Structure formats: structure tokens, C-alpha cells
Image (cartoon, grey):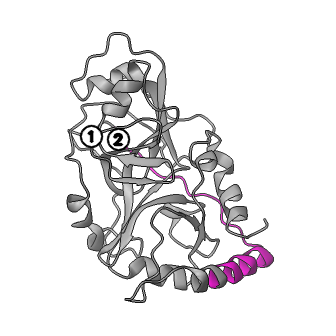
Amino acid sequence: MKGFTPPASDQNSIVKGVSLAAISRFPPGKSRLFAHLCRHSLAGRSRFVQAFAFPHLFVTIGGMAISRVISRSLVLAAFLLAAAFITSAAPANETGYDYVGGRLLVASPRLADPRFAHAVIYMVDHDRSGALGLMINRGLGSGPLGKFLKGFGIIEPEATGNIRLLSGGPVEPGALFIIHSGDFKGVSPLSTRGGIVVTRRVDALTALARGNGPASALVILGYAGWGPGQLEEEIRNGNWLIAPATKALIFDRQLATKWERASEMAGVEL
């Protein structure tokens, strides 16, 4: 199905080409997602396939553009200093784990994995079994909302306007997630924190098509996952900074500047 086009000038886009095909349904809940965490971690314990061609996914990723890496030693030193401070200040439970659910992970310049260069990730969940997050600054493309809904077998004749698709991470690149504002009360959300709701159901999009949906929403495909203890280790190693998750930053449409702004929120001046 045609109609979705990749962003023309978004420097944070990881996609060279996007095509729309059929969309499969994924059951709500996180149990199926966490089963994959140990095999699809940031630590690179499984090989990331750069080209996906599954019959039930509506995007085909043709390649990945590597973001520029900041090499200025002063910036790197500032990130490392802030990472050490934030890690020591993060709340820990009785197990000694530092959990960051409901906050933002901000990639530091020392992070070598190009999939996550300059990434800003909203952490949906984090506990002793692992962590799940969604990148909020990587564009995939945009297209008519009505065509998107048809992929789910939902016909909304009055649907107008386009939706923008974001890449949430390299794991299960066809898995649908929606982050939306808390003014819309959907069914069985995965997470609700500070007026920020995460769901895997399409009722929020259906409501948008009918004109009574959430005031703000991000439509995301794929996610980032970590196994037990992996994210904690990466934070201790200075790969990530932690910043508060604000609705203003999460739902801002200016993807190209989210990393810089999130870095400043984490205490780093660029």
C-alpha cells in the first residue's frame, strides 16, 4: 500500500525508505516483549538486521544513517561527570537496582552503538526483569491516518490528516506503541505516569480519526529492550544520562533538537 513517505530532511531519521503494507495486530501487554529482552539488548548480544521484510509489518527499513558523533573532549567530560552524579543520585530499591521507569534516557557521546547515537528514550518500564523504552526522536515517515487504520481493518470514512511514525528501537520493528497525553482515557494502557500514557491499542488513533482523541500522541514502531541488569550497567559505564520526562519535550514535533534539549535537562551544557 502506498502513501507513506520518509522524512525529507530529518537528520535523526534512521530510515532511507518506508513502504506501507499490511499491519499485523500485536496483543496488548508486555510479557511477550520482555521475553525478547535478553536477545535484543543494546549490548549487542544479537545481530541487528538492517533490512526488514516481514509480510505483516507495514514498514520496510532499507538502511540506517549513522548520526554524527560529537568528539569534543569537554562535552564528553561533561557527560561523564553528569552520568556519575545522576547514577549515584538515582533511587535504588532493596536489590540495589537503579530503576528509571517513567524518565528519559539520553545517549552520551561515548555510546558507540550507531542505532542509539543521539537517542532520547522514554522508559516505559524498568525492574529486576529488564527494561523497555521507546525512542522519541527518530522519524520513520508520515502518511494519511485513514490508510494507516485500514491496515488494522478499521474503516473510518471521516478520517482526515496525516500521522507521523517514529522508530522506537530495533526490536520488533513492526510492534505498535502509542504514547499519548492523559486527557484521553483508553483501554488497558501499559503505563500511565505524570499524564503520559503508553498503550499498544489503536483506540487512541480511532478516536483521533473521529475528532475526540488525545490532544497529543506519538505513533511508534519497535522498541529498545534490555535484559536483567544490562541497563544498570550501561548507566554506570556512562553510556546514558537520565532526565525527567516532560510532556513538552516528549510531544514536541521538533525531533532534530530533542537530544540537545534532553541533554540540557540532564545537566549537560552543549
Residue 248 seen by the camera: yes
Q: Is residue 149 left or right of residue 102?
A: left
Image quadrant assignment for residue 261 = bottom right
Q: Position of residue 74 (x, y in %)?
A: 80, 77
- C-alpha distance separating marks 2 and 1: 8 Å
Task: Verify whether residue 83 appears in magenta.
Answer: yes
- How many marks can you see? 2
Q: Position of residue 45 (x, y in %)?
A: 33, 76
Write the residue at 57% across / 48% down.
250
The amino acid marked with disc number 1 is Leu
Write the residue at 35% across / 63% down.
48
Q: Secondary structure at mark 2?
A: loop
Q: Is residue 92 left or right of residue 57?
A: right
Q: Is residue 254 left or right of residue 233?
A: right
Q: Which residue is mark 1?
A: 57
Q: Which residue is mark 2?
A: 60
Task: Verify whether residue 15 appears in magenta.
Answer: no
Write the residue at 74% across / 70% down.
268
Position of residue 38 relative to residue 10, above or below, is below
Q: Marks 2 and 1: CB-CB under 8 Å?
A: yes
Position of residue 57 relative to residue 223, above or below, is above
The amino acid marked with disc number 2 is Thr
First to last magenta residue range: 59-84
Position of residue 125 relative to residue 191, above or below, is below
Position of residue 39 relative to residue 87, above or below, is above
Q: Secondary structure at mark 1?
A: loop
Write the residue at 35% across / 39% down.
59
Q: Which is in the foreground here, disc 2 or disc 1?
A: 1
Image quadrant assignment for residue 109 = bottom right
Q: Position of residue 234 (x, y in %)?
A: 49, 80
Residue 50 seen by the camera: no
